[in-house]
Amino acid sequence: MPSSSPAALAPVLVLVPGATGAPADGGPRFHLADATVPQLSVTDLVATRGDGVFETIGAFDGVPVNVGPHLERLARSADLVDLPAPDLATLAEAVDAAISAHDPVAELSVRVMLTRGIEGAGVPTCWIHARVSDDWTPYRAGMRVAALDRGLPTTVAETSPWLLPGAKTLSYAVNMAAVREAKRRGAADVLFVASDGYVLEGPTSTLLVRRGDTFLTTPASAGVLPGTSVKSLFTWLQEQEGRTVREELMTLADVTGSDGAWLLSSTRLAAPLTHLDDTELPVDHELTARFERVLKGQA
């Protein structure tokens, strides 16, 4: 497991009553709040039903990465679950306020949460929580991953959109159960596999696979979350490195027979797979370090 954040560095909480429109009481659109005292109602639908969406933004040496793409994806998730459209300009300002209010650190995790609000009120709840990122160093060095069946086909987005494939919701019980199962198998993380045999994504990450000079990821149409990190790497690989990038449905054999694979996320960055189940994969540490710089916005 990643190391916990240092206790001496207090997290920052920003409440955003103006996330989807002007606050009813005429107050400010967002404001700092005490992160050490209760702030969320027990009847908020995120507490009773997990009804909401979120994004996690990485900030490195005080500079956030991909704020626009993250907030646009939050708006996409909100639309998929029939939440009011968030005010992205307000949220961007609130993210900056949370980062500015936090003590300077090398790596900060900034989570933007938007819920359906208190049951019956019809007003969404929104807050931003910034804290020191966990120590992901062991994962960035390489990790064993377990392949687990997600139980849904790659056609789920077309056939069953009410299952919310591709939405980043706060209903994370299944994802966390999958991670616990991976650890029972001696692995650090999970690669989900569709019922029709294609690999998908991790519980909190996007798959990237190398095949020679071509880099591949699972199509968003297969019901995975459109990755902000893989989009950044694809742009860099194409424009700076002259590599070929594309979306492609892949099998487990495609991954185990590849020239390398990573699970990407905004705070853990690029975690190379050393093993997928019992099959060992090649790991390019130098390329992984370059990926890390790109994902930190420092390339």
Image (spheres, rainbow, N blue to C red):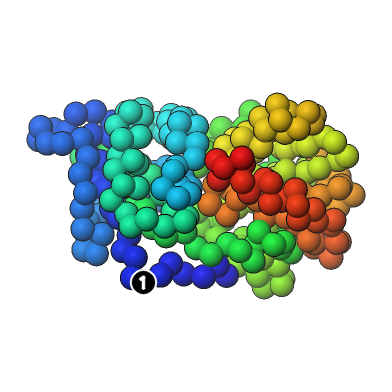
Q: Residue at x 36, y 29 (%)?
A: 88
Camera-nearest residue between 167 and 56: 56
Q: Residue at x 45, y 31 (%)?
A: 68
Camera-nearest residue between 291 and 51: 291
Mark 1, secondary structure of its residue: loop
Query: Which amino acid, by three-letter code, is at mark 1?
Result: Ala
Quadrant housing residue 278: bottom right
Camera-nearest residue between 81 and 102: 102
- Is 59 left, or right, of 273 in this rendering? left
Vertically, is 65 above or below 5? above
How many labels, in total?
1
Q: Residue at x 19, y 29 (%)?
A: 22
| Residue carrying label 1 | 7
Q: Position of residue 158 (x, y in %)?
A: 64, 28
Examine the rendering and report whether any part of residue 203 can be seen: yes
Q: Quadrant of the N terminus?
A: bottom right
- Is 200 left, or right, of 203 in this rendering? right
Say few, some or many: other residues with alpha carbon within 10 Å of mark 1 (under 14 / 14 to 19 / 20 or more). Answer: few
Q: Position of residue 276 (x, y in %)?
A: 79, 59
Q: Position of residue 35 (x, y in %)?
A: 26, 59
Quadrant housing residue 230: top right
Q: Residue at x 35, y 41 (%)?
A: 95
Vertically, is 25 above or below 176? above
Vertically, is 218 above or below 47? above
Examine the rendering and report whether any part of residue 263 can be seen: no
- Is 288 left, or right, of 97 in this rendering? right
Q: Quadrant of the C terminus?
A: top right
Q: Position of residue 296 (x, y in %)?
A: 55, 45
**Which residue lies most toward the left here?**
25
